Image: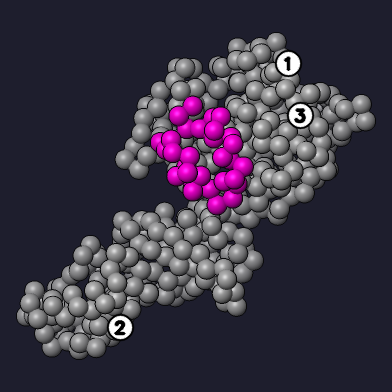
Amino acid sequence: MFTAANIALVNPQISVLVLEAASQPLQKVRISGGGRCNLTHHCFDAAILLSHYPRGSKELRGLFHRFQPEHTIAWFAKQGLHTKTEADRRMFPVSDDSNDVIQTLLKTARKGNITLATGVRTQQITKHTDGHFELLTQDPEHGTQTLTSQCLMLATGYSPSGWQFARALGHTVNSPVPSLFPFKVTSSPLKGLQGISLPRVSGQLSFEGDKKSTITAEGAFLITHQGVSGPLIYRLSAWGAPKLSEHQYQATLKLDFLPDWTDEALKAKFLECQETDWAKKQMKNTRFENIPHRLWEQLLVQSGIDIEGRADTTSRKRLQNQLVDSLKRLQLSVNGRSPSKEEFVSCGGVLRKDIDFSSMQSKQCPGLFFAGEIIDIDGLTGGFNFQACWSAGWVAAQSLAQNTFL
């Protein structure tokens, strides 16, 4: 729809047909961001922006040079939709209503020769020797139809049918796997602490028998009923998506609750506290940094420290070794992934090397274009996946509207 809308703005005479299998268009936009639509991220530095894409950053560099978040904000504003930036730099419509994004796209598309056909399922796509595409479609109103077109865009998102069409038209597809999901941890020293969160934790993900595939990240951390979640876990799941799938979501997660402290500095500080601030207190009544109290108690127990005992009689060895180890290297066994509202993002899709990112046209099949999650590009949560879609759709529209691909 974004591509169609931009074609309408550049060359309203071009006839465009948008085939939508659902009864209503843009449903992914509607449900995103809890119904508010996190349509981009307030980041105009290309290097920082690209660091949020586990796959596709090289190709996105050129796209972002032409159309990045700043352009997205300006584009929607020009069409009458104004945005706001939240504390975490995610951007939403001022109205907090994703329907306003949908109506803006539909209204802009109506400025051109755009037809939207909903409830239409494409069953087969064929490329003929004379260069045109033939589509076999099915819908309740017209039954089976054959449509032809000079050019075709596949923007089918996380859809097996889209990848099937891409394969039939000569493309290779990396088998898609989920990205951006919480971890299940059924046996955990953090059990019973659901709801506790920390603003910054460092995590390291590793896999048995695969020492070269260690993945590290930092971010806010949340303990859930089923395991662990939060931006830290989403980042680890995104960067580790292929390996996690390969290892059937079995991995080891090491957590560092105090990434700014070295072991040596912690040991020295604990000895100082034991002799001063904590001296006459029971260990359960002590606290350190921003560690939530219930988590601190659990880490003391995990370290073999008597939480009822006084600090000045607590074993220095346990403070210096076990407690430091629990704070810096708490180990969890990941044994699955939990369902997530973010999990409509996938890792995998049409190979990037088979697409000309200056136009979004296929290198294998002239006249065929791609945009969105059908391509092997994915970003972290926070508006980055939408931005990749807007950028690819805008570049494709410029090429299609001006016939620069011919």
> How is the rendered protein coloured?
one colour
The amino acid beneath tag 3 is Leu
Q: Give the mark nearer the N terminus: 2 vs 3.
A: 3
Compare marks 2 and 1 and give the one earlier in the sequence. 1
Amino acid type assigned to the residue bearing label 2 in the image: Gln
Q: Are marks 2 and 1 in contact (CB under 8 Å)?
A: no
For mark 2, does the 10 Å Cα neighbourhood hold few (<14), some (14 to 19), or many (20 or more) residues?
A: some
Quadrant of the image containing the C terminus? top right
Q: Are there few (<14), some (14-19), or many (20+) residues within 10 Å of tag 1?
A: some
Q: Nearer the viewer, residue 348 or 345?
A: 348
Depth check: give the residue in front, 199 or 36: 199
In this figure, which residue is indicated by the disc labeled 1? 15
Q: Which residue is mark 3?
A: 152
Residue 288 x, y percent position in the rendering: 20, 69
Quadrant in which the N terminus is drawn: top right
| Neighbour tally class for label 3: few under 14, some 14-19, many 20 plus, Cα within 10 Å | many
Tell me which residue sits at (63%, 55%) in the image: 177
* Distance from the alpha carbon under mark 2 to that under mark 3: 61 Å
Q: Secondary structure at mark 1?
A: strand
Q: Which residue is mark 2?
A: 322
Residue displayed at 54% across by 66% down:
336
Residue 122: image location, x then y, percent: 77, 34
Q: Residue at x 49, y 48 (%)?
A: 51
Marker disc for residue 190: none
Q: Main secondary structure of the magenta part?
A: helix
Circles 1, 3 touching at the beta carbon (< 8 Å): no
Amino acid type assigned to the residue bearing label 1 in the image:
Ser
- Label 3 element class: strand
In primary-sequence order, the first of circles 1 and 3 is 1
Q: Quadrant of residue 282?
A: bottom left
Magenta residues span: 42-71
